Amino acid sequence: MSGVDDWQLVARAQAGDMNAFADLVRRYQAPVMQFCLRMVGSVQDAEDLAQEAFVRVHRHLHRLEPRARFMTVLFGIARNLALNALRDSGRRGRGRTASLDMVPPVGDESMRPDHAARLREVESVILAALEAVSPEHREVLILREMNGLDYDAIAEVVGCPKGTVRSRLARAREQLRLQVIALGGKDL
Amino acid sequence: MKQQEEFEMLSAYLDGEAEDPATVERWLAGSPEAARRLEELRRMSAHLKAVPAPEVSPAFATRIVARVRETAAPTRRWRVWAPVGALCALALVAGIWVGLPQAPEEGIPPVTALPDLPDGEAEQALLGAFERRDAVPETADALAFSTSPEPDPALDATTEEWVAGMADTLWFDALAEEWEADEDLDMLVQSLDARELETFKELLREYERKGATI
């Protein structure tokens, strides 16, 4: 499957091949879940949003043209769903809950306990700071740093000019830095 | 340069998206403060990148595919049952035409009443095929959209729903003579052993008997 590009899978899925669509889901489920989770903060909500994003992208498959990037279409849908969820609930990423589908990341067992504890502490501060960044800045930061999208792709997902992505990312990083300091993580 | 502009320049440089990287590098070489801020940004970026993506179980994809199939199912049913509805309407109109206001003739099933699946056997046969998915991974994976070797309550529930849905679909496709055209059903049949195939054929025959009046 790894040798098959997105568009080949999309074309097969458009022809009704559900295996191809399932391959697309498997290819993008972790990054989309990551994006949704870091946007809304709740594992259960993120799972629901990610699932809905894939169902909606399937509904619109027949509209996709070869020039469209499947990934940006998918993230665009996930992003709209996440922003709607935040608007509806008034939450800003709180209330994590357990889920059957979410498996806790497995740590390196050979890692020294003090080093592992330090990494957990850093991660905890970074994630808490990220939650406090405003949604319009948080989304570009997640797409860039956690999903690895370039500026052009982020501009497509968010629906704004590349220059706006550039300035929002800078502001997002500044907000994150200030939040980290506020949380006592100056030495990170 | 304003502070915000400087920060944007460093941020874009960090991402490999600076419009003029050479200018930024010259500035960094002459400004320890700019270099310190870039280093700070780089550390923060590394911390964000290090946050692991949540691992998602194979049941996630299975559930999505099941949901997509669910939303597609009514269309197939409608396609098959539309002629039945037309027949019922025709029979009703014909009854009125000859002055006999009566219900459609016995034998034509009501449009809204779908035939029940026989209890147990067919579902068991299909579940047996799922349980052997490790032995025939490619077919079963395509069939079940699952690679999970572990028992998973969520997956089992989905599988049962899927099996019931597939058996239901099989009936309608058989009526519509689309068996050969349906790749999923081909794979399904290939994954059954001889005994299960016989059970399944019996199921089909039963459905054919039920549908003989259509």
Image (spheres, coloured by chain):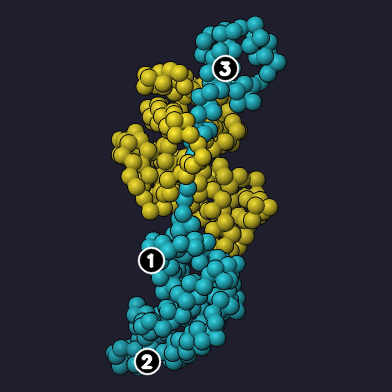
Chain colours: A yellow, B cyan
> Earlier along the polypeptide chain: callout 3 or callout 1?
3
Q: Quadrant of the N terminus of chain B?
A: top right
**From mark 1 to mark 2, how far is it between C-alphas?**
35 Å
- Please give the chain letter of the residue carrying mark 2: B
- Establish if A119 lies above or below B187: above
Quadrant assignment, res B163:
bottom left
Identify residue for label 3. Answer: B38
Q: Quadrant of the C terminus of chain B?
A: bottom left
Question: Relative to residue B137, is residue B77 drawn left or right?
Answer: left
Which mark is in front, 1 or 2? 1
Where residue B124 is drawn, which disc sits there?
none
Identify residue for label 1. Answer: B157
Mark 2 residue type: Gly
Who's the residue at 47% across and 44% down the image? A106
Res B28 seen here = yes
- Please give the chain letter of the residue carrying mark 1: B
Residue B77 drawn at (x, y percent)? 44, 74
Who's the residue at 50% across and 67% down the image? B144
For mark 3, give the secondary structure. Answer: helix
Mark 3 residue type: Leu
Identify residue for label 2. Answer: B107
Mark 1 residue type: Ala
> Earlier along the polypeptide chain: callout 1 or callout 2?
2
- Please give the chain letter of the residue carrying mark 3: B
